[in-house]
Amino acid sequence: MPEERISIDLTPPTKSWMEPTVKFRKGTYCYSAVPKHQKYLDLPYPREWNPAEEDWKLPEHWKEIILKGMKDLLGQYRSFKLFLDICVRCGACADKCHFFIGSGDPKNMPVLRAELLRSVYRRYFTSSGKILGRLAGARELTEEVLKEWFYYFFQCTECRRCSVFCPYGIDTCEITMMGRELLNLVGCNINWVVEPASNCYRTGNHLGVPPHAFKSTLEFAVEEVKEITGIKVEATINRKGAEVLFISPSADYFGNPHWFTFLGYLMLFHEIGLDYTWSAYASEGGNFGLFHSSELAKRLNAKIYAEAKRLGVKWILGGECGHMWRVLHQYMDTYNGPADFLEEPVSPITGTHFDNAKSTKMVHICEFTADLIKNNKLKLDPSRNDKWKVTYHDSCNPSRGMGLFEEPRYILHHAGNYFYDMPENTIKERTFCCGSGAGLGADENMEIRLRGGFPRANAVKYVHEKFGVNLLTCVCAIDKATLPPLLEYWVPGVEVAGIHELVGNALVMSGEKERTTDLRGEPLTKFQVIS
Ligand code: SF4
Ligand code: SF4
């Protein structure tokens, strides 16, 4: 890549950080939410407005609304107040954010991102800030400050990498979440968050796929599996009395390369004879409400338990997604639980009790599949994936949000012959974000996405050059959508896949015909790897 593309100006700015200096430059911000989607969700102050224009058409008493909202949030979340109070500005988090690394913008240092809000908190909610003002690091809430919040809280992917390095455990992601909650109160959000949330409310999924289209898609996938394997798999929707409800992100059945993972699920479930059903109502595991507000996340999440109850299943299995698992693992239980109408999940194939899902009653597909492999319940031919030299991107939410480090790697080691981890400081709990999560994956935001994704891409480049890695696997629907353009820019020659695509390729199904293609429809190139 040309050197000039990665040369970043790290000269400190001439103005104090307290002066808001935002310029809404094309490529570095997302478009505002479209009023019809805000209205559909009954969100406050829907209107046409443009972040790049001077007049944001804010409601008359916007300042009072924000300050009252801040007071409410401080009363509601002890962690919020704690995170605002205890930062000692040690700087340990400063260079850990991919957006700071990729942009060189000091306000993208987690500590300074948080100060944008913390300074207003000091001014209105602390004695020192009220008396000493700027001397105590306090500043007035002005329209310019509000614009700065919008710019930088939508340049944070809520990935929580910074929190891993903070000696006090401060989670800047949560400060971003609070910042976004406050912006929502005056109708300031981005369309890439609000439209999927509104679609989800209307049709059950982010993409707005209606039930009949979902059914057709599933039928199409069944045909495709038949073409590849000669086997007609069963895939039912809304079947009452099934043992398991399976929920995946909607991108799995509509996007590329997600689709091949979708085929992999169908093949796996057929092969082990799982008694499961899809749902046309809970046809989305993802939850863009999380990137808007706790209230909206809770509303969108409600359909999962409601549908499990209606269908009378015993427990829930969930597909490959990132933030979906943050919500399911960390919030669902308190949002909409307890799910005492469900049973503690037990694999009907191996008898394994998933103790970690005792409370939520929802198991991650990688936990489920790794357990099948561990108990020798799958026949896998890893050489069918020999054209791939594979590495694994720990998607932020399954890794930092739920500790899913080993299961995906365990599966990959059994489904393929060539696996290479990226450098230690870029994986597992220290994984680098894709740069496009938390609703920032909009096309109009491409410059910031490419900058924010640079550290991830750089680690991929390392294994690409050292080991010839040509496939980046992950278990996140957003990653599968946003990593391809990132890699095309920084590391051409590396493709992106879900783990269950490789499982589907390797899975030797009972009664299958001789396979000539992989799930992408490309010729099987067994034993053709050039080392
Ligand atoms: S590492 Fe923690 S205490 Fe140190 S500056 Fe960052 S948020 Fe503050
Ligand atoms: S949560 Fe992630 S994107 Fe946000 S400040 Fe921390 S490291 Fe940066």
Image (cartoon, rainbow, N blue to C red):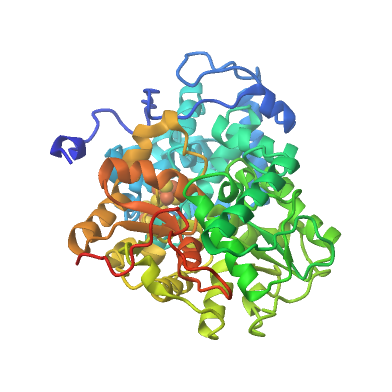
Question: Can the viewer see residue 88 in this picture?
Answer: no
Q: Position of residue 4 (x, y in %)?
A: 15, 35
Quadrant that contains the C terminus: bottom left
Q: Seen from this angle, which residue lies furthest left?
A: 3
Residue name at image x 78 percent, y 75 percent: 343
Q: Position of residue 29 (x, y in %)?
A: 43, 29
Q: Is residue 115 above or below residue 509?
A: above
Residue name at image x 46 percent, y 45 percent: 481
Q: Quadrant of ligand 1?
A: bottom left
Residue name at image x 22 percent, y 61 percent: 468
Q: Is residue 186 above or below residue 335?
A: above
Residue 312, image quadrant? bottom right
Query: Quick one: 389 or 156, which is closer to the camera?
Result: 389
Q: Is residue 422 above or below residue 195?
A: below
Query: Quick one: 413 or 90, which is closer to the camera?
Result: 413
Quadrant that contains the N terminus: top left
Query: Quick one: 164 or 427, which is closer to the camera?
Result: 427
Q: Position of residue 457 (x, y in %)?
A: 30, 50
Residue 460, image quadrant? bottom left
Q: Position of residue 78 (x, y in %)?
A: 61, 55
Residue name at image x 55 percent, y 34 percent: 192
Q: Is residue 475 left or right of residue 310?
A: left
